[in-house]
Image (cartoon, rainbow, N blue to C red):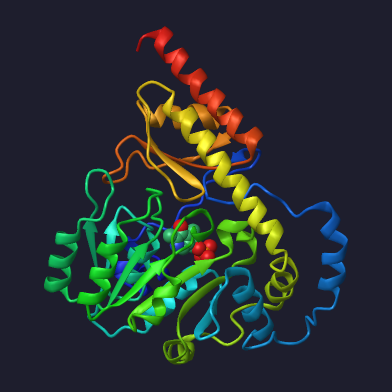
Amino acid sequence: MSFIHNWLRADIQEINAYHVPCSDNLIKLDAMESPFALPDELISQYLAYLADAQLNRYPSPSAEELNQTLRDLMDIPKEFGVLLGNGSDELIQLLALACDTDDTILSIEPSFVMYDMIAKFTRLNYQGVSLTQDYKLDLNSILESINKHKPKLIFIAYPNNPTGNTFDRIAIEKIINMTDAMVVLDEAYYAYAGDSFISDIAKYPNLVVLRTVSKIGFAGLRLGLLISSQEMVSELDKLRLPYNINILTQVSANFLLKEKDEINKNAAIIIEQRQILSDALKQIEGLLAYPSQANFILFKAPKAQELFDYLKANGILIKNLSGAPKLTNCLRVTVGDNDQNKQFISIVKEFYSLKMNNND
Ligand SMILES: *Cc1c(COP(=O)(O)O)cnc(C)c1O
């Protein structure tokens, strides 16, 4: 047996690593990235701004300017605290690190896989509660599971990934009210949704909201936010590694995220494209597109695996969920720009017309 296999925790050896498929030369519609690159007219200004970054120094430990930039961009009231993470993934991990041995993380299924993975990394218990057949919250099962497992942390992605929908707000408020757990509303897709729990932070001491800039055009920066009461943030801040937001991210974000109009304009284009894409998918016979409040669409398609392969062979990468529990024959496509979406739809149509003609 090799050294590492003797040495490593057995439960970690059993985990499958988070798999990121190769996307070279493919149109990337698999990871909810924005299709919009930096506008040309901003590039030279941005580079001049970057040139001032003092790479020989540690970055600002509290990242105050960046904190303010994000508050302005996302309209976060000043009475709330904001904790920054190297992506919101880091903040999910930080919340897990704040738990005690034997504590339980509860989430819904299907949802974002990192809640379960991070529970495993940090040796916490994980409890998943199934959504209903049409991916709605099953409030009774959730309340039952809370009573039975007494979770310390509850994650609800709102809108949910990979299903794309938001949930009944009243049901979520009931959960927040009845549990002793910290309830984390993960609003990674806030820019594409019609609702948010940010203002509810004032009402509920056990409510935390997560956001990220990954899905609004800046996945490469790795920058996420935890928003809650000032008191909660100052306690949780003890678990943050010093200088977790590197100087290139801080400087870049302070320049790029001040372009609020541009960012909002791009989000509006994606929302418009989402409607066009969803309508086009629904017109394809046999295909079921789920309603989305995010920048992606989950759809159920006959011969999903074959369709996925056909798209890839024709230069388009989407996400294949067809083998995952409760997602039989489901694929997830990120909303791209007009050209990308058109290409995607035309290849999907081509696939089904070939299939029909072959009659298999
Ligand atoms: C993409 C995603 C994240 C990860 O965000 P990062 O800031 O890139 O780490 C978190 N939560 C959900 C629900 C997501 O879909």
184 shown above or below 317? below
Q: Is 267 left, or right, of 174 in this rendering? A: right
Q: Is 349 left, or right, of 67 in this rendering? A: left
Q: In this rendered view, identify the residue nearer to me: 1 or 122.
A: 122
Q: Residue at x 50, y 84 (%)?
A: 81
In the rendered image, the quadrant that contains the N terminus is: bottom left
Q: How many marks?
A: 0
Q: Is 344 left, or right, of 54 in this rendering? A: left
Q: Residue at x 69, y 82 (%)?
A: 65
In the rendered image, the quadrant that contains the C terminus is: top left
Residue 125 visible in rendering: no
Residue 219 visible in rendering: yes
The picture places residue 291, in percent across and down from the top left corner, at: 39, 42
The picture places residue 69, in percent across and down from the top left corner, at: 66, 75
The picture places residue 45, in percent across and down from the top left corner, at: 86, 65
Q: Can you tell which quarter of the image residue 10 is in?
A: bottom left
Q: Residue at x 62, y 80 (%)?
A: 67
Q: Is 199 left, or right, of 36 in this rendering? A: left
55 shown above or below 279? below
Q: In this rendered view, identify the residue nearer to me: 198 or 355.
A: 198
The picture places residue 3, in percent across and down from the top left corner, at: 41, 70
337 shown above or below 11? above
Q: Residue at x 31, y 42 (%)?
A: 327
